[in-house]
Image (cartoon, rainbow, N blue to C red):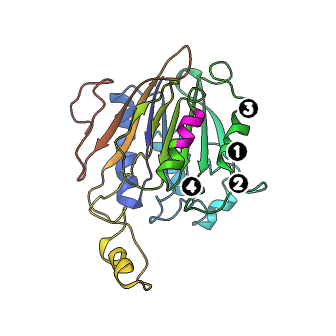
């Protein structure tokens, strides 16, 4: 099974680019399942039900989120009904939405998508390690599910790496989101789990983590409130990864980075398809 994961989508230009590219990527890479972190897609802060539906119509199978999940209040009225969107599973009991969802990929195969939020330099949520262990207790792979994708939304690389090793051999992929910077440590761990500390953002890298530079810089220099941060709307880079699972174990057989457009050095997964431009 071939799975595409794209990092945090920041702002309108980025989400339009992702929606345009997903159908092409599905075809070019012969994808079975697509996961996108959409928590910054509504003006850089949160996601709306309308934007979520547009992602689904473009070919996205599942949306993950993170600490900005509640920034657009209208989501509170719809997230319980949306089985294709997950919020961090370690929010307190009774929080709307779900922390994991079991969805069908192409060919009827079952993919479990889990969203967890870290605690170092983040909101003090419940223990993410205990939360993910509880979710996986009855979800054996292979058998019950064919693949398990874990989006670990957090700041500290040490906490993300600890989660990767904690889940090694039990899930297909542990990928970090939130910092908006793609890390160079994409690899398969000893137990067969694909891992990357952060997938990076889908957004304009002529920015401060996706936001217009000047107000963001002023906050560091003056240490005083500035105008509201807004997404940079230049040409976005689409950042993520493509992985192939082992049919017998559900673990990762191959994983490669994907970077398209914008300012970053491009990366095309040559082990999956010809290296011509996806555009």
Could you tell me which residue is drawn at 69 percent across and 28 percent down?
139
Please provide percent x and percent y for residue 5.
Answer: 45, 39
First in sequence, mark 1 or 4: give its number.
4
Please provide percent x and percent y for residue 15.
Answer: 40, 53
Q: CA distance from mark 3 to mark 4?
A: 23 Å
- Residue extending furthest toward the right: 94
Tally of numbered tags = 4
Neighbour tally class for label 3: few under 14, some 14-19, many 20 plus, Cα within 10 Å = few
Neighbour tally class for label 4: few under 14, some 14-19, many 20 plus, Cα within 10 Å = many
Q: SS for tag 3?
A: loop
First in sequence, mark 2 or 4: give its number.
4
Residue on which the image places disc 1: 131
Q: CA distance from mark 1 to mark 2?
A: 7 Å
Q: Give the camera-side residue of 23 and 155.
A: 155
First in sequence, mark 3 or 1: give its number.
1
Residue on which the image places disc 2: 126
* Residue contact between numbered discs 1 and 2, judged by CB atoms under 8 Å: yes
Q: Is residue 85 visible?
A: no
First in sequence, mark 3 or 4: give its number.
4
Residue on which the image places disc 4: 66
Question: Which segment did they paint magenta?
Answer: 162-167
First in sequence, mark 3 or 2: give its number.
2
Q: SS for tag 4?
A: loop
Q: CA distance from mark 2 to mark 4?
A: 14 Å
Q: CA distance from mark 1 to mark 4?
A: 15 Å
Q: Which mark is residue 140?
A: none
Q: SS for tag 2?
A: loop
Neighbour tally class for label 2: few under 14, some 14-19, many 20 plus, Cα within 10 Å = some
* Residue contact between numbered discs 3 and 4, judged by CB atoms under 8 Å: no
Residue on which the image places disc 3: 137
Q: SS for tag 1?
A: helix
């Amino acid at each position: 099974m071939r799975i595409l994961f794209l990092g945090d989508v920041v702002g309108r230009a980025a989400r339009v680019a992702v929606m345009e590219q997903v159908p092409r990527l599905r075809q070019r890479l012969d994808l079975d399942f697509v996961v996108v972190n959409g928590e910054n897609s509504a003006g850089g802060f949160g996601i709306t039900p309308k934007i979520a539906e547009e992602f689904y119509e473009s070919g996205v199978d599942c949306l993950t989120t993170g600490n900005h999940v509640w920034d657009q209040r209208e989501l509170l009225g719809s997230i319980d009904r949306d089985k294709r969107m997950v919020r961090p599973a370690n929010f307190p009991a009774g929080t709307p939405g779900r922390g994991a969802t079991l969805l069908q990929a192409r060919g009827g195969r079952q993919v479990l998508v889990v969203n967890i939020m870290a605690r170092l330099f983040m909101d003090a949520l419940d223990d993410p390690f205990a939360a993910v262990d509880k979710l996986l207790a009855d979800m054996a792979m292979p058998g019950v599910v064919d693949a398990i994708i874990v989006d670990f939304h957090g700041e500290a690389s040490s906490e993300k790496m600890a989660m990767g090793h904690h889940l090694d051999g039990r899930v297909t992929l542990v990928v970090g989101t939130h910092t908006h910077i793609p890390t160079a440590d994409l690899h398969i761990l000893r137990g067969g789990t694909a891992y990357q500390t952060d997938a990076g953002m889908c957004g304009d890298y002529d920015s401060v983590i996706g936001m217009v530079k000047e107000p963001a810089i002023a906050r560091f220099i003056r240490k005083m409130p500035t105008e509201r941060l807004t997404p940079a709307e230049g040409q976005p880079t689409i950042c993520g990864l493509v992985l192939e699972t082992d049919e017998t174990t559900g673990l990762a057989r191959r994983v490669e980075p994907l970077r398209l457009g914008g300012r970053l050095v491009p990366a095309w997964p040559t082990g999956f398809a010809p290296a011509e431009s996806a555009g």
